Image (spheres, coloured by chain):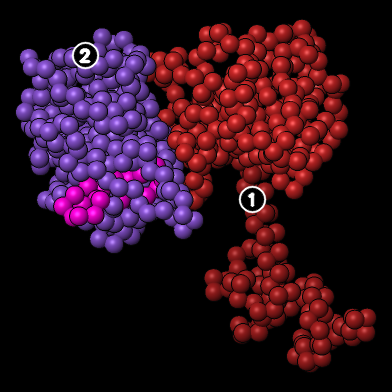
Chain colours: A purple, B red
Amino acid sequence: MADKSQICSVWVGSETGILKGVSLSKKQAFNFCEFSCLSRDQEVCVLGWGDPQETEVLVGSVNGTVKTFSTEKGIFTETRQCGESTQGRFTGLAVTDSALITCVETGLLRVWKEGSETVEINAGKNVSRMRQNPSQCNQVATGGKENGLKVWDLERPETPIFTSKNVRNDWLDLRVPEWVRDMAFIPNSDKIVTCTGLHQVRVYDPASPQRRPVLESEFGEYPLTALSLPANKDSVVVGNTQGQLAILDLRKGLVRGCLKGLAGGVRGLQCHPSLPLVASCGLDRFLRVHSLEDRTLQHTHTAHLNPSTQTITWEASHTVVFSES
Amino acid sequence: MRTGFTALKKVKINSDANMDIVEAQEIKGTFTKKKNKKQKKQPTPPLTRSDDSMVKETETEHVDMLGESAFPPEFRVSEIKNKQRRHLMFMKLKLEKRKQRMAMKKKKKKERDALGDKAPPKNVPKTIENQRIYDETTVNPEDEEVAFDEGTDEFSAYFNRLTHPKVLITTSDRPRGRTVRFCRQLATVIPDAHVYYRKGLALKKIIPQCVARGFTYLMVINEDRKVPNGMVLCHLPDGPTAHFKVSSVRLRKEMKRRGKDPTEHSPEVILNNFTTRLGHSIGRLFAALFPHDPQFVGRQVATFHNQRDFIFFRFHRYIFKNEQRVGIQELGPRFTLKLRSLQKGTFDSKFGEYEWILKRHENDVCRRRFNL
């Protein structure tokens, strides 16, 4: 078990609670699950790395438990109960300095520290995604349906440090609905890029005085479900419910190219931290790895089970972590 | 034309030296055909090779008559500019090839008969189904993950006998006669099916009402230009929605040698060739349309046969004449389905997540790869 988990470079969580590790070099996948009792209750909602060395994978399930899986040992080492299933599914999982940050759909963002009390933030209703700033670990962003992008600082949990404003009314003077599905912090700057359920990709800049998006572009006609930033700057990979993956350029907002192969809605998308590769996982039960430079399919693997949202994590020998939701 | 023909006849008696004169006299190309034919029958001395196609033809004819069937290597049928002559030469070429093939076949058969029992087994001809690329998602019967997945998916309520199927059949707005008759015939085939007029209502609004009234399926037949061409099959509590293209619809009146109308008995269901994971989902979708226990008294059977991603629906009545022989009568409508998309959740084409979509250009790359 341990040797199997050590060679896996991509981790995928499924709807039945099985954590799958895929080794791209060996082109094999291994299932890791607890007690060999599967249930829909254990559906994996979020995946995340437990530590910067990428030796532990945190698995958040529908029933409110967060399990820790050790890649070195190949078994689930710990289980924590972080809320009940009545509070909604997990929409985000992150780790700072030995504290665990979880966010659920009803908007309850909690910081779990051992011993001391949990800090709670109410991020509004219907939160679809929560992400942590990789460079500043105490900043998180949340967004959802009719719930705009908000950036929170965990040290000051009362108000968000940045609340986005909706765009102006459209040409019929109607309010444009907003539905933030996924977001990412652009490294080396303050900016945040989000993708919406109304097929828009928006870039917000908290440093600038305007709270409206700095850049807005559209892709396709279907809701964008996942987003990921590749290693090189100025571009973003998005996926929609029809299985179309596109690379967009963030300088002008134009589509640079599409990645072909997916036949079902994209559930998880993650770029490799240093190599120009992107792993995508969809409802068609396949894990695909594309190369970003020439947009060819490098590797396909049947994931056999439906992946749930936010469920891919890369790991490389250089500690590449992809957490996909 | 007539006069030309008679002119040719006169020409026939002349020797080959006069061929050039004959050619000059031709006004229409159609005459050459006859001329060639007549020349074929005359044994001509071998002429030197020249660009004159006529000469070539005679030469090759001569070669033919010598018993060889090989054309000289520089000769290609496609180089003859005259369409009639080219066509003739091509026909001859084909005839030659066919003769050779028949000769080979005969020889092989003779050898096979001569060997008797020791003959090597016959070669299986290649078909597209034989050459199908192995699909990685083909379900292995012992696969536990798939078994668990199917045990807990949206159809598990039906397969665990917790619910009974109740189908609502409707159409797109303002259907024409053919579609209406098709819906009515479908309602006789599927037990506990109810046909309702669409009335221009939105599907998203119909679905909660259906769920409240205990329906398990919503089937919408889409019509285009007075002919049914699409079907949306939505499993109701919160199940997947499949969108099919419907083609080749034959109503009961148009079927030859059909039996009497189907009775109220529940039919047996046959699902052929749904091997992949997607195929399994679709197969279960069809199976859940019919009640669990077929009434064998009725001797009726509904077949969904999948071949090359097309699903053929047939409805028969069978009778066992003795242990080995069965007679079948086709009743009921027949149609062909092709899956266009499978969407998770009830009908929501704009915001729903698709489990599988037919992407035609990506499928066109390989002829031997199928999804169901």
Identified by mark 2, the residue type is: Gln
Query: In this orientation, which residue lies closer to the viewer: A223 or B227?
Result: A223
- Residue appearing at x 64%, y 57% in the figure: B97
Write the start and end of the magenta stretch as one range.
Answer: A191-211
Judge the density around disc 1: few (<14), some (14-19), many (≥20) Cα neighbours within 10 Å. Answer: few
Identified by mark 1, the residue type is: Arg
Query: In this orientation, which residue lies closer to the viewer: A236 or B41?
Result: A236
Q: Which residue is mark 1?
A: B101
The vertical placement of B23 against A74, above or below, is below
**Chain identity of mark 1:** B
Q: Quadrant of residue A41?
A: top left
- Residue appearing at x 72%, y 35% in the figure: B199
Question: Residue B121 appears at what percent x and percent y?
Answer: 55, 30
Residue A249 seen in this snapshot? yes
Q: Secondary structure at mark 2?
A: strand
The answer for how far apart the CA atoms under marks 1 and 2 are is 77 Å
Question: Residue A251 appears at what percent x and percent y?
Answer: 25, 60
Q: Which residue is mark 2?
A: A81
Q: Where residue B319 is drawn, which disc sits there?
A: none
The vertical placement of A39 against A287, above or below, is above
> Could you tell whether A60 is left or right of A7 in the image?
right
- Residue appearing at x 79%, y 34% in the figure: B180
**Chain identity of mark 2:** A
